[in-house]
Amino acid sequence: MAMAREFYIYNTLSHSKELFKPVHPGRVGLYVCGPTVYGDAHLGHARPGVTYDVLFRLLRKIGYQVRYVRNITDVGHLENDADSGEDKIAKKARLEQLEPMEVVQTYTLRYHEAMRRLNVLPPSIEPRASGHIIEQIALVKKILEAGYAYESNGSIYFDVARYDEKHHYGVLSGRNLEDTREGTRSLDGQDDKRSPLDFALWKKAAPEHIMHWPSPWSEGFPGWHLECSAMSQKYLGDVFDIHGGGMDLMFPHHECELAQNTASRGQGGVHYWMHNNMITIKGQKMGKSLGNFITLSELFTGRNDVLDQAYSPMTVRFFILQAHYRSPLDFSNEALQAAEKGYRRLMQAVRDVKSIPVSPTAAARPEIASLPEKVYEALCDDLNTPTALSVLFDAVRIVNSVKDKLLEINPADRDTLSSLLGEVTSDVLGLCDEASDSASAGLVDGLIGLVVEQRQQAKAQKDWATSDRLRDRLKELGVQLKDTKEGCEWTVE
Ligand code: ZN
């Protein structure tokens, strides 16, 4: 197969941008930490969703076969992100009097729907933590055998101090054991841990805990960090290419994952660690307690006091792409409105480029011929989407000048502009044309209405053969008719 294009990636582990070298030629293993499904998908989910989707699309576009694994956390994530408190899903189930798996199903479907609207491609594999308890128990056994964990009252904890004697705990997040110790609360005497730095690999379930499984140590449940070590190894192997997630997961989640990998298989197992920055709201962290929490469905409908209006999924996607994934991104109505304008301007040019006039005698323009290379150079430079967009807007300006007859271009240059705007915008950046989607939806509605009208006329003239034929043909196409006193209602399956 053809050699893939060079791609540079910022590696959190080395704190530097590196030339990407895959473990296996032509193939990429990508693991991204997915959501804990105990509530609606919110603005915070949109950024990693879109960022790793662009990475997935780009790697495929430049010639790699990509196995993209994004997990669903449905057990083990406790309320305070550490080893105490209630399981987030079990708590929701208790409050709403549901089975935990009903909570998981509801919010997994809503997350999928939000991602689908943002035009985020589904991953190649989407494993659930609760479906991999056997693998997680096997991993705990390995870490115990290697001497980096201990049992205490039926729970198993990772021995951080012991690990740090041989390896560096904190290598990913750039801290040493002393810094980490300072940031950790001391043990309250009730704890089974030897040190507050230690983290749970397996927790014995309290009698009121709903989700638990048998293990050699107790009836219990796996620690939150364990699932990603177990599932990434299962689907991508002992060593794989890229592990992504939000910056908020770097410590402790990814640090613990790295330690678990090293303790159980002698190596970190991940070549490139990648972290996206967070979305803030007017400079503040988003949080339920701060009253600035926005779900994605609220964003798409405008139903939240923080919002001046509804913002379409593609506006939100464009807004995210305008910033580099490692830079902070601040949400405000003004910023979203500017993104809406930019998105519409880009899409207008995508539509216009197909019909702008060309003049066969116009000279070739090198500034047009060089645009595709510039876009890919930006995208392959650690996913520099803001620069890629600015190059696309250079193309937009050229299209508009041709449209306004200020510039003449030849057919080859028009083809370059057309494939650049069409392919890069939709295939790599994942921006689809909402106006044409809704226009075609409107057209379908109009055509169905027209056929229904014809059938009503046939019925009025007692032409039953025609009326039945139209009804049956519509039914074959998935359109159900229902005759009522007022006329005819129809629904599409
Ligand atoms: Zn994870």
Image (cartoon, grey):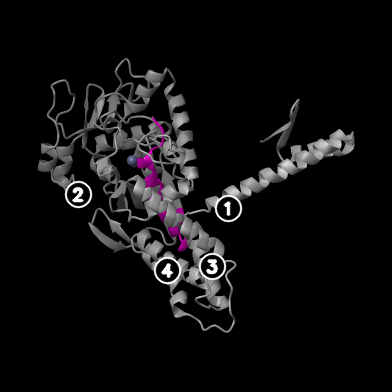
Q: Which residue is mark 3?
A: 418
Q: Quadrant of residue 354?
A: bottom right
Of mark 1 and mark 2, the one earlier in the sequence is: 2
Give x and y (percent) for residue 158.
Answer: 22, 35
Under 8 Å from ligand 1: the CB of mark 1?
no
Residue 106 seen in the figure: yes
Please state the extent of the stretch shown in magenta in the rendering: 39-66
Secondary structure of the residue carrying numbered label 2? loop
> What residue is disc 1 on?
436
Magenta span contains residue 47: yes
Q: Which amino acid lies under the numbered mark 4 shown in the image of this protein?
A: Asp
Q: Nearer the viewer, residue 491 or 246?
A: 491
Labels 3 & 4 near each other (Cβ < 8 A):
no
Q: CA distance from mark 1 to mark 3?
A: 17 Å
Reading the image, the residue beneath label 2 is 171
The total number of labels drawn is: 4
